[in-house]
Image (cartoon, helix red, strand yellow):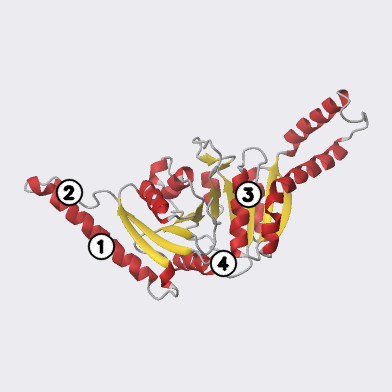
Amino acid sequence: MRGFGTSATMLVASGKNIPAEFIDCCYGLSKTTGMNLRLTYVCPSEAGSSAYLGHAYVGAHANHLKDSLRLWHEDSAQKALDKNLAGLEGKSRFTTSVRTGDIASAIFTDAAQCGASLIICSAQKESYKSMFKGSSTSLSLLTGSRLPVLVLPDKGGSLPDFSKDLKIIVADDLETTPQAALGVACQFAAAIGHVTLYHVHVTDEEKELRGYIARLKMAMNLSQIPYDEAVSEESAMENFRASLKEKMHARMSPYQETLEKASCHLEVKVLAGQVTEALSGFRDSVGADMLVFGRHSFVHSKPFGIGKLPFRAMMEMKSPVMMVPPL
């Protein structure tokens, strides 16, 4: 996994006309971490050419016209990208790229060629509600990228100010969440500095408690622990929550020193309830600026979900979401 320091590059999947607040947010991250910023725009394959290519008089000149239209679109996009960067300081750290083809595939190729460690894109308000993966660039990037992907909310959402002390939630189901997600969250927080990182697990207490008590009684029957027929649900609940926190501390222990050196503060939280509601409520209560999830090796498709939290639910939280793939 590449880091997020001064030698790193973040690739921003952009349109021709980037909202000022979007580019300001990406620029702020670049300025805070020292990461290089690369704006990449992908022109759709054969953009604008289909009507001409079907004309009877085009004939043998079809390929030439196709190339001319492609070059015109690419040149137009390049000028728009240059305009978006005009006036920003430190432009020596900024590069641009214009490609033609399938958007997600072109972005992955460009990210590999420039050695990017992070991909940033915007969640289009309507496209992510579609039932077809290909119609949502953000969903295609989240489910197919080998790099962490940071999705910034569209209009109506809140964008983080990376010049201020941030609060970041990293969700962990303690089962299928890749350890890499925790590592990336800690590296990202350390690169920014002065971050409060909330390591959060949401439990269905009734279901998990039954399983915990069953394991406890089995251990007693096998004489693995002293027998105590007075084990109550209340004491079992207390022990159950303590065991969860112990496991969470163990999963975070490899990154504790890194966080401390960057003046970051780690808090472990166990929440109860339905995942989306619990995370959304906790985010609001602490004023978190973004959320980090690990992408499971298997991505559910009905409904579109990444792990136990549906993609649409993540986007409708109106918060920046970083998705970390299995590494």
- In the rendered image of this protein, does residue 299 appear above or below residue 277? above
Residue at which label 4 appears? 162
For the residue carrying disc 1, how many other residues have a C-alpha within 10 Å: few (<14), some (14-19), or many (20+)? few
Residue at which label 3 appears? 182
Rendered image: mark on residue 75: 1
Element at label 2: helix
Q: Residues under labels 4 and 3: Cα distance?
A: 20 Å
Q: Residue shown at 62%/61% (left/top)? A: 190
Question: Disc 2 vs disc 1: which is toward the camera?
Answer: 1
Question: The C terminus lies in which quarter of the figure?
Answer: top right
Q: Is residue 298 left or right of residue 281?
A: left
Q: Is residue 265 left or right of residue 159?
A: right
Q: What amino acid is labelled 3 in the image?
A: Leu
> Is residue 271 visible to us here?
no
Residue at which label 2 appears? 51
Q: What amino acid is labelled 2 in the image?
A: Ala
Q: Residue shown at 67%/58% (left/top)? A: 258
Question: Disc 2 vs disc 3: which is toward the camera?
Answer: 3
